[in-house]
């Protein structure tokens, strides 16, 4: 199969594939969005009608495709986050919204569907609740580490600014930090949009409950969420204890992982260097399965073709982002902690697995 054949297979659905889950449907929504967002007449007409009769906003909300309206909202956020980050030189503006926006988009699709049909679709509601639980937990974890303080920021951004310079950092913010991350947060939730797209028409609404795949998805998501909760808690406890010890002792007086400076020989981190990152990526791949369940229900098929729709781009891009961001994280850690290179040789980056024995690993274990 040649390159053109592969691309054709990936982007062209069969005759029985639901139209609302095709790449053509996504392209049509994006075209409508770009047309309106770049049309001064469309923008002025919207502002004028909204000022004259604000009640029309509810009607407009119901009549506008929810993916299209979420794109407008994301565009506004991109502008706000970019301006705020350039004014304050704190490039963690999107980080503060990372755990909040996916839940907002999920509820947006669920409520919009309810306004059109008068009932909650069980798959939409289940997915939205899962994302809300994920977001609430991640928000708490971010807050207790000081992420919402005015001066709170991702430690990697000062490192990047030092190496890229102010002009390079401004360009990175313009191209990647503000726009790319905001749009990714929107598209991470689009697997739920597939259910809305296929079943928001009340005349074809025949869903009576969750499918087997839906229940598998829910179970897997909760399992990966548990892993992320445990990993974040272990990391938080270790860092808190390490800095508490350093406030009373010198670094050469510490033992084990506290002396190394990072968590290695206990908990999930002895099997994965980033078990929380592994779980985070896995949860969003699992969320994608909700779109597969929707396609299977709408088409009446369950073959391999139902496992591929346009929303798979979101977990793919998220996984690629984690590859890049984790490489930067580990570069900084390697410069800061001499033993971190040995840790990388001994333990997998993401997928939890039995560690390999190294000289540093063995000597550090003896001190525990």
Image (cartoon, rainbow, N blue to C red):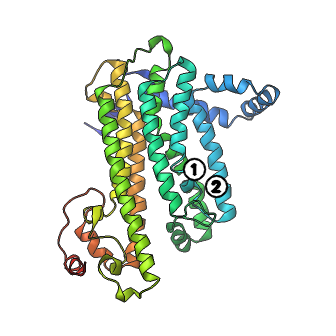
Q: Quadrant of the C terminus?
A: bottom left
Residue 20: quarter of image: top left
Q: Secondary structure at mark 2?
A: helix
Q: Dot 2: within a 10 Å radius of its alpha carbon, few (fewer than 14), some, or many (20 or more) residues?
A: many
Q: Dot 1: within a 10 Å radius of its alpha carbon, few (fewer than 14), some, or many (20 or more) residues?
A: many
Residue 23 drawn at (x, y percent): 44, 30
Kindly identify the residue that appears in the image at 43 percent across and 54 percent down. Answer: 321
Rendered position, 137 above or below 160: above
Residue 11: quarter of image: top left
- Can residue 285 be seen here? yes
Where does label 2 land, which residue?
82
Kindly identify the residue that appears in the image at 52 percent across and 51 percent down. Answer: 98
Tell which residue pokes out farthest to the right in this image. Answer: 52
Q: Nearer the viewer, residue 78 or 14?
A: 78
180 relative to 45 in the view: left or right: left
Rendered position, 94 above or below 160: above
- 2 or 1: tag closer to the N-terminus: 2
Q: Secondary structure at mark 1?
A: helix
Where does label 1 land, which residue?
179
Rendered position, 340 above or below 137: below
The residues bearing labels 2 and 1 have C-alpha atoms spaced at a distance of 8 Å
Residue 206 drawn at (x, y percent): 40, 14
């Amino acid at each position: 199969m040649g390159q053109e054949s592969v691309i054709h297979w990936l982007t062209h659905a069969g005759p029985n594939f639901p139209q609302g889950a095709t790449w053509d449907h996504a392209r049509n929504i994006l075209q409508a969005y770009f047309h309106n967002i770049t049309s001064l007449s469309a923008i002025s007409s919207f502002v004028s009608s909204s000022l004259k009769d604000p009640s029309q906003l509810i009607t407009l909300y119901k009549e506008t495709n929810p993916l299209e309206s979420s794109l407008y909202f994301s565009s506004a956020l991109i502008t706000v986050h970019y301006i705020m980050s350039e004014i304050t030189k704190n490039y963690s503006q999107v980080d503060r919204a990372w755990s909040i926006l996916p839940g907002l988009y999920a509820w947006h699709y669920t409520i919009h569907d309810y306004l059109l049909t008068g009932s909650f679709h069980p798959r939409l509601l289940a997915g939205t609740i899962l994302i809300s639980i994920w977001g609430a937990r991640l928000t708490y974890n971010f807050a207790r580490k000081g992420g919402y303080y005015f001066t709170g920021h991702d430690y990697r951004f000062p490192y990047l600014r030092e190496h890229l310079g102010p002009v390079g950092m401004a360009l990175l913010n313009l191209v990647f930090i503000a726009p790319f991350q905001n749009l990714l947060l929107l598209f991470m939730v689009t697997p739920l949009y597939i259910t809305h797209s296929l079943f928001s028409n009340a005349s074809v609404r025949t869903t009576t409950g969750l499918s087997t795949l839906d229940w598998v998805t829910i179970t897997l998501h909760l399992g990966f969420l548990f892993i992320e909760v445990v990993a974040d808690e272990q990391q938080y406890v270790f860092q808190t204890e390490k800095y508490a010890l350093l406030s009373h002792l010198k670094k050469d007086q510490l033992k084990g992982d506290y002396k190394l400076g990072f968590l290695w020989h206990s908990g999930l981190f002895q099997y994965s260097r980033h078990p929380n990152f592994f779980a985070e990526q896995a949860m969003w791949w699992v969320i994608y399965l909700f779109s597969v369940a929707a396609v299977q229900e709408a088409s009446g098929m369950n073959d391999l073709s139902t496992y591929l729709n346009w929303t798979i781009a979101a977990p793919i891009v998220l996984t690629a982002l984690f590859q890049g961001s984790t490489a930067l994280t580990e570069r900084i850690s390697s410069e800061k902690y001499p033993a971190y290179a040995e840790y990388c040789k001994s333990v997998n980056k993401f997928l939890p697995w039995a560690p390999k024995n190294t000289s540093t690993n063995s000597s550090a274990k003896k001190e525990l």
